[in-house]
Image: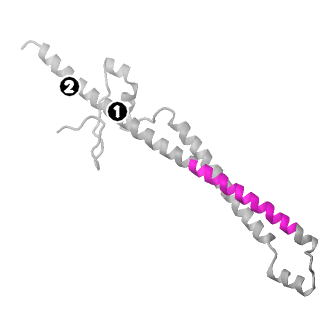
Amino acid sequence: MAQPCGLALRGSPPPPCAPPSGPTAARLPYAAALSATNQPPSPPGIEDLRDKREEINRQILKEDEEKAKARLRRRAAQPSPRAARVARVAGLTRPPRFALQIQNDLAVLTKRLSHLNDSIARKVASRNEYDKTISETEAAYLKILESSQTLLTVLKRETITLTKKQQPQ
């Protein structure tokens, strides 16, 4: 069984294609692009989706770095066990002024970490939706290209058959 032009069986390279000619080529410009490179062109608008996905991915990486820095600052702002012992030994019942500042800093950093975690979760969900949309769009586009290539093959075969019937024998 002959393999349609441009369609590859699993594990085999696609067969070479002759560029379409005649009125078919004018109506189906993507067919010429497919046969010229044996690679289907990207679906219209897919690059915009990829760019938006990459921008979200960059934002996720940036916020992950910021989250790591905030965790380090939070860890550094926590009072050490030694400081607590010194305060007890000194008989301090009320925390010193710097301890109140540390508590405020901890609250601010904890709030910032929570905000970053929420933002990262939303962006990861958005990035996953972009991935899904891109893969579904590419799959649908490839099916359309395969169908159009099959149609071109059938059209070519029927044209040859009709031409043979019209020739005097």
Q: Is residue 14 left or right of residue 75?
A: left
Residue designated by label 1:
35
> Percent x, y for residue 150?
27, 31
The boundaries of the magenta stretch are 101-125
Q: Is residue 129 left or right of residue 69?
A: left
135 or 152, which lies in front? 135
Image quarter where the C terminus lies is: top left
Q: Is residue 66 visible?
A: no
Compared with 31, 8 (above or below) is: below
Residue designated by label 2:
157
20 or 117, which lies in front? 117
Q: Magenta-highlighted stretch: main secondary structure?
A: helix
Residue type indicated by callout 2: Arg
150 or 67, which lies in front? 67
58 or 35, which lies in front? 58
Mark 1 vs 2, N-terminal side: 1
Magenta-span inclusion, residue 114: yes
Residue drawn at the location 16% of the way across and 17% of the way down: 162
Residue type indicated by callout 1: Ser
Query: Which quadrant of the figure has residue 8?
Result: top left
Magenta-span inclusion, residue 63: no
Query: Which quadrant of the figure has residue 1?
Result: top left
Residue drawn at the location 57% of the way across and 41% of the way down: 51
* Residue contact between numbered discs 1 and 2, judged by CB atoms under 8 Å: no
Q: Check disc 1: other Cα within 10 Å, few if <14, some if 14-19, many if 20+.
A: some
Compared with 75, 44 (above or below) is: above
